[in-house]
Image: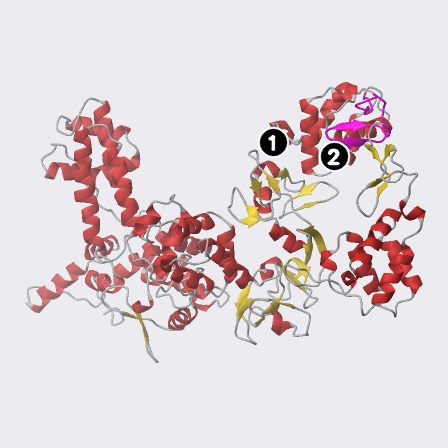
Amino acid sequence: MVPDVFAPEVLADSIGVIVDLIAERESGLDRDTITRTVEAVAGGRAKRRQLAQALIGRPGVLVDGRSPAPRAVADLLIALNKAGAAHVSEPVCATCGKKLRTVQRRGEHWYCGVCGPVCEACAACGQLRRVSCRDRNGAPRCSQCPLDDGRDPTPLIVDVVARADPTLPDDVIATTAAAAAPQAGQRHRLAWALQDRPDLLTGAGSQAPVPTVLRLIDALCAAGSHTIVRPPCPGCARVIRLHRPIGGMWLCRNCTAKSRARRCARCGAAREPASRDEHGEPICGSCLIRDPINHEICVECRGRRPVSVRSEDGPRCENCRPWTIAECSICARTVPCSISVATGRPWCDACQQRWARCVACSQVRRVRGGTLEEPLCAECVRDEPGFWRTCPGCGQPGRLHTNRCARCSMQQRLRELLSDEHGDIRTDLHDLHQALTAVERPDAVAAWLDQGGGPTILRELAAGDRALSHETLDELPAGKPVEHLRSVLVAIGTLPHRDEQMLRLQRWTAELIAARPDPEERNLLHRYAVWHVIRRLRSRVGDADTTYGQARAAKRNIKSAAALLDWLAAHGLSLATARQGDLDLWMTSAAPGDRRDSGNFVRWARRHKLTRLDHAAERWGGPTGAIDTETRWEQARWLLHDDTVDAAARVAGLLVLLYAQTASAIAELTIDHIQLTDQQVRLRLGREPILIPAPLDQLVRDLVQTRAGHAAVGGRHTSPWLFPGGQPGRHLSAFRMAERLRQLGIQASRARSAALFQLAGNLPAGVLARTLGIHISVAAAWQRASSGDWLAYAAEISRRSHGTQSISTENDSSTPTAETR
C-alpha cells in the first residue's frame, strides 16, 4: 500500500533513512556500497519515499524477506544480496517459502514461478493448467494447445495489408509486422484485429483494439505507403502520435490529459492529477511541484527549492540549472539562452514570454523574432506554409501547446468558470467576460486564472444568486484576488467607484473599538476616532480618495490613543483622574511612536473638558538630514540627458529633484494636470501651472504618449493616470513610486528636502505654495529654515516707500533677482 502520510525523516532524506536501516543490520557492506545499491533501485523521489516508509513501517522485512511489501523492497533485497550482503534476506515466496532471485507479484505478496501463476481450464484440452495465451474469444489456452495449431499469423497480416495497399512488397509488410508485433501472441491479436476491421489501416486506426495496429500503421507509412493512413486524434483532429485508449478511442497525450482532468483540491484548476493528497483528493502538477515537501536541497546554492533538473552531482533548482550562455538575438543581453526553432538563433527566457505589437502586422502577439525595437510575431518571422500549427478556434498560426492558442484557451476557461450548468453567463457578468476576453495579452488573464484564488471567486460569483455588488465581494474572503477583481469591475463600469482606503480604515476602527471590554472606553474611543480623526480626514480629502499614507497616519493616532487608555487602565487611572505626573511617566515608558501620536488625543480630550492633562505640541525645527545640493544637481543632469533610463522614471525623479514633489503627489498626477501646446508644456502641481523648460518638456510629452501600466484590463494606453499602476483604473502606489526612485539612487525625502530648501530661499512662501501645491504654513516654515525670510524683505520695502529709513540693497543677498521675480 502507498502511504498517505510520510514520516518527517522520510521527507527530509529518504535515501539516508534506507541506508541507516540497512547499515544497522548489515555489517558485510560498507556505507558507500549500500548507498550506491539503494540509489540504483530506489528510482525517483516518489518511489524512494514509498520504499523508505515501507522499511520504517516494518524493518523486519530486511531479515525475514516476507511480504506483504512493495515491489521495490523485493528489488532492494535482491540487489543487496547480489552486492554481497550476508545478513539481509532474499525475498521468499509467500506460499512455499522458497528464496527468490526474481519476483512474481499477486496483490501485495511475492510468489515463486510455481506458486505465482493462476491456473485455469484450457479451452482446447480442458486441463487445469497455467495460461499460456488466450484465443480470439478471450478463452485461456495452455502451452500444449497453441493458437491456430502453432501456425504463424504473418501471412494473414500480409494478405490484409496487401489488399489495402497493393504497391507494398510482401517482404516489406512481413518485416514491418514482425517489428510492430515481435511476439507470436501479439501477431495473432494483430491479425484478428485487421481481419475484423480492415478500415483500421485507412483512417479508423483510433478505434484499434490493440496498440500493435498503430505501430504497424506508423511502420508502413515510414516504409513509403501512400494508401495506409495515420489516424487523427478523435479529440483534436490532429495527426499525431496517439497515447492511450479512453472510452474505446485512442487519444493523443493532450486529449488524454483533458479526459482525465479533475478539479485540483488546492488551486481549483481542472487538470490531469499528478498525485493525491493525504485525503485522496487530486493535486495538479503545478501544486505538486510547489508543495514544500517535494523541495530538495540544491547542490549549487544549498537552498531547499523545487527541483528543475537532476545533474550528476545531484538536484539543481531553476536558478542553478546549467544553461548555455549566449547573446539573445532579441534583447541582445548575454544571459542563459536556448535555441529558437523558428529562427535558429539563441533567445532568453524573458523574450520567450514577451508580448509586443508586431511591426509587420501591428497585432499584439508573442514575440518570436526581430528585436526589442522591431519585434515580430510568429507568422511574420517565418511565414512558411505548414511550419506553424493553426489554432482551430481563431485560425491564428503559432506554437500551440494545448491545441488552442492562448486567447482561445483563456476564453474557454472563462466560459467554464462563469457559465451555469446550461452554459449561460449571468447578465451582470457579461461585461466582465467581455473585458477579460478582449485584453491584448491573454497570457496575463491566464496567469491570474491559474494562480491564486481567482478561479474560486469567479466560480462562487457565477453560482451565487446575489447580484454583483461591493457588498457581495465584501462577503468573500479578504485578500488580493478579491481586491484585484473589484478594481477590474470598477474599471469596466460594472461597480461604482468607492474610497477603499477610507472603508478599510472604518472597518479597522470598528473592530478595534468593539474589542475593548470597558463600555466607557469604547464610547470615548469612538468619539475620538470616528467624530474627530476620521471626520477631519474626510474634510481634508473632500471628493478625492484617501491615500494609503493618510489612512496610516489616522491609524497611528487611533492606536496611540488606545495604547494610552490601556496604560491608564492598567494603573487604575482614567483620563479624568490622571495627573500630569502620570502622563509624564507614560511618556518615559511608551514607544516613541505612541509618545508622539498620543498628543493629538490628549489635546482633543482637553478641548472637550475630558481631562486636565497637557501634551505640548512639537514644532518643526527644520530639516534634520544633510542638504546635499551638489548631489541633487548631479542627479538632475543625469536624468535630463541619459536616454537609457526609462522615461517614466526620469520624469518622476526630476519632479522630486527640481520641483520638490513627494512620491504620493507624483503617483496621483493625471494627464489633466498637463497642458500641451505646440510650443509649450505646462504642469499644474498647485493652483497655478508651471512652464516646463527643455529638455524636460519633451520627456513629459513622450511620457504622455507612451505611458502604460501592467494591468491587462481597463485600458493599458487609455488610463487617465500619468503613472498607471498594476491594478485596473488605479495609479502607481506611493510605495512603488518611492521604490522606483530608490532603484535610481534617489532618496525621495532627502532630495525633496534639498529642493525645498533651495526653492524656499529664492521664492516667496505664497508663490511656493501656489505653484508646488503645498500648504502656505509648510512653505513659510521652509522659508524660515532656509533663512529666506521674505516677510522681512516686504517690511523693508514698505519702510523705504514711506521714507522712514534708507538702506542700500545693492549687495543685499535677500533681494530677489529678475530670474526669481
Where's residue 136, x and y in %?
82, 48
| Residue 704 painted magenta | no
Say what secondary structure mark 2 lies in.
helix
Is residue 550 visible in the rendered structure shown here? Answer: no
Mark 1 is on which residue type?
A: Asp
Quadrant containing the N terminus is top right
Magenta segment, prevailing SS (helix, strand or loop): loop
- Mark 2 crowd level (few <14, some 14–19, many ≥20, 10 Å Cα): many
Asked which quadrant contains residue 114, the reply is top right
| Residue 94 painted magenta | yes
Mark 2 is on which residue type?
A: Ala
Q: Which residues are magenta?
A: 88-114
Q: Residue at x 81, y 42 (%)?
A: 139
Q: Which mark is residue 633?
A: none
Where's residue 103, x and y in %?
82, 31
- Mark 1 crowd level (few <14, some 14–19, many ≥20, 10 Å Cα): few
Q: Is residue 568 above or below residue 659?
A: above
Q: 753 left or right of 317?
A: left
Where's residue 611, x and y in %?
12, 32
Query: Which dot, 2 or 1, sits closer to the camera?
Result: 1
State how far apart marks 2 and 1 are (Cα). Answer: 19 Å
Earlier along the polypeptide chain: callout 2 or callout 1? 1
Q: Which mark is residue 42?
A: 2
- Disc 1 marks which residue? 4
Q: Nearer the viewer, residue 313 or 781?
A: 313
> Which color scheme did the rendering employ for the protein?
secondary structure
Q: Is residue 507 above or below residue 432?
A: above
